[in-house]
Amino acid sequence: MRITPKHLAIGLLYLVLICGALFALVPFAWMASTSLKTLPEVARWPIQWIPSDPQWQNYIAVFSHVPFLQFYANTVFVTLLRTLGLLITSCMAGYAFARLRFPGRDVIFLFYLGTMMVPGQVTVIPRFIAMRWLHWIDTYQALIVPGMFSAFGVFLMRQFFMGIPRSLDDAAILDGASHLDIFWRVCLPLSKPAIATLVIFAFVGSWNDFMWPLVVINSVEKLVLSVGLSYFQDLYYTEWTLLMAASVMTMVPVLLVYVLAQRYFVQGIALTGTKG
């Protein structure tokens, strides 16, 4: 087989991509390796990537060091409800902006889209004041309800709904279907890739959210994992082995969700990026 410049360019591209992927995996490899080490091995230089005697008991010690199981249960509870709520509001609003005609629709959507330009940190104080006014400080409602609305989710679903042929609406209306029927029986079944994409973004965003739980939660029994991990650190000492073991266990659900929805995720990104 004759090697052409095109083959060399493709080979070079693959080499760069593989090197980039390996470089991105280094922090995760260090995290997994450290979770199985003793404290003296953590401080050793050069880095000993493979522990001489894997300390599997680090993963058990995590649960006795802090209420890690409670943090885990809180995170799962909050993330599932936030993701479900965000899915419902984004799908309904996206359908309204994409398929319904009402006065000022495009102007309202433009203003709604403009909120994506505002950094989340800017809205922390107004949201905190709203939660205090509702007497929701240090409650699960404060963790869940504000996270159930997303301009990005509405934008994503609107883009996908706009790509569905209008002829399907016309055919359903001729059969006597209402807009609720069209939304539930026509548009949603055709939107699995976009829904999977939104679920991944919402799940990861809620799972990793650190600032908002730090601001509104005061009780240890209501903390989530992102804040609870800080309990392995204090001013003068850090339990690196336990912290990394807890971090590995924290990362597992996110990887699991991504692997299960990866096929739909790629389709959703491609379709919502090219249509609308």
Image: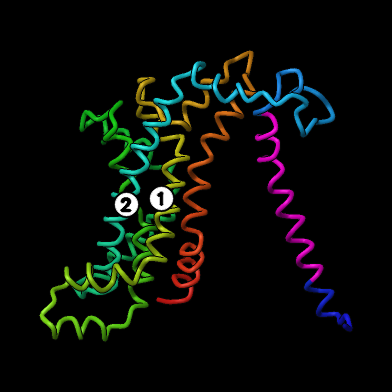
Q: Alpha-carbon neighbours of circle 2 within 10 Å: few (<14), some, or many (≥20)?
A: many
First to last magenta residue range: 11-34
What kind of element bears circle 2?
helix
In this view, the residue in front, 276 or 42, is 42
Q: Alpha-carbon neighbours of circle 1 within 10 Å: few (<14), some, or many (≥20)?
A: many
Residues at circles 1 and 2 in contact by the CB criterion of under 8 Å: yes
Kind of residue indicated by mark 2: Leu
Residue at the top extreme, as displayed = 236
Choose the circle earlier in sequence order: 1 or 2.
2
Q: CA distance from mark 1 to mark 2?
A: 7 Å
Q: Which residue is mark 2?
A: 86
Residue at 77% across / 33% down in the picture?
50
The magenta stretch spans residue 14: yes
Image quarter in which the N terminus is found? bottom right
* Residue 185 in picture, x, y percent from top left: 23, 71
Residue at the right extreme, as displayed = 2
Q: Quadrant of residue 237?
A: top right
Q: Which residue is mark 1?
A: 202
Kind of residue indicated by mark 1: Ala
* Residue 141 in picture, x, y percent from top left: 26, 35
